[in-house]
Image: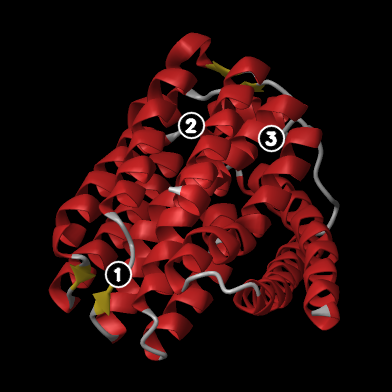
Amino acid sequence: MGMSLLAMLAGLVLLYFGAEGLVRGSSSLALRLGISPLVIGLTVVAYGTSMPELVVSIKAVLLGQGAISIGNVVGSNIFNIAVILGIAALIYPMKVQRQLVRLDTPVMILVSFLFLFFFRDLAVSRIEGGILFIGVLTYTIGNLYLARRESAKKAQEKLNEASPKHSGNLGADLLFIAAGFGLLILGANFLVEGAVTFARLLGISEAVIGLTIVAAGTSLPELATSVVAALKKESDIAIGNIVGSNIFNILCILGTASLIRPITGTGISMIDVYVMLVAAVALLPILKTDFLLDRKEGCALLIGYIAYLYYLLHG
């Protein structure tokens, strides 16, 4: 048990430094390339911080642990919105870009409904996985296309507001990003392995482990990244990271995992999927109100997650 706790502590330290490097490098790269921090947050940062979920879900599928694979994604999406955005908003009330309200959050809601439809039989087939994977390709290409349509002058104005300075070296930017990704994945691996071992010693079920311990553990890169971004007042990266990660989790992670082997999520209740869907739908009016995610809304999100966690453990 002592080794499990030590692994969890080491994971947390690695996650913090990985997030620091990732935010610094990606913000600077966005400024250098004339791409808005929001697009960087929705793609590069979001996909990078979701790598632990991808690794864990594929590993779980190969081991026949479908409940952990599905629970990891469903639990992570709930945790991302309710806990990570809640904490980030408490640190620093964040301005919301109109693109998030008009495009990206509705896409997140749409893919959540799509997953609900596919998972109605508590399984995700290879055909359904293929549809999900095509979805992530389409979304990524679409985002990059929209970024390129933005005029250089307009992009530069946005970048100067959100990320006023960059490093003097492109290699340094790429090194920060690569090192950040590496530390995030390593830290998440330490944390998840330690947490799962600890949970099993306490006799917690596989489904609950996937929805809570594994989901929260693999979401800690997003937590660390969004918290660091909030501290740096990088609202675009803090929020874009979460919305992009949730889209990536469903489309790419479940898509890829089910292409490798059809997933059966026995033990995962549809109530958990409904909670994920409600969190996604509720986020839209929250972001749309004055285009600001404030501390009261962040607090409400956290209270909602505490209620869900109580249901999981005592329901």
Q: Secondary structure at mark 3?
A: helix
Q: Earlier in the sequence, mark 2 or mark 3?
A: 3
Q: Looking at this view, is 49 or 272 the one in front? A: 272
Say which amino acid is labelled 2.
Answer: Ser
Q: Looking at this view, is 311 or 256 the one in front? A: 311
What residue sits right under mark 1 in the picture?
255
Mark 2 and mark 3: Cα distance apart in space: 34 Å
Q: Is residue 223 visible?
A: yes
Say which amino acid is labelled 1.
Answer: Gly
Q: Earlier in the sequence, mark 1 or mark 3?
A: 3
Is 164 left or right of 79, judged from the image as shown? right
Q: Earlier in the sequence, mark 2 or mark 1?
A: 2
Note whether 264 is above or below 13 in the view shown: below
Q: Position of residue 190 (x, y in %)?
A: 73, 77
The dot on residue 151 is: 2
Which quarter of the image is occupied by the N terminus? Answer: bottom right
Residue for point 47% across, 51% down: 312
Is 21 left or right of 62, judged from the image as shown? right
What residue sits right under mark 3 in the picture?
87
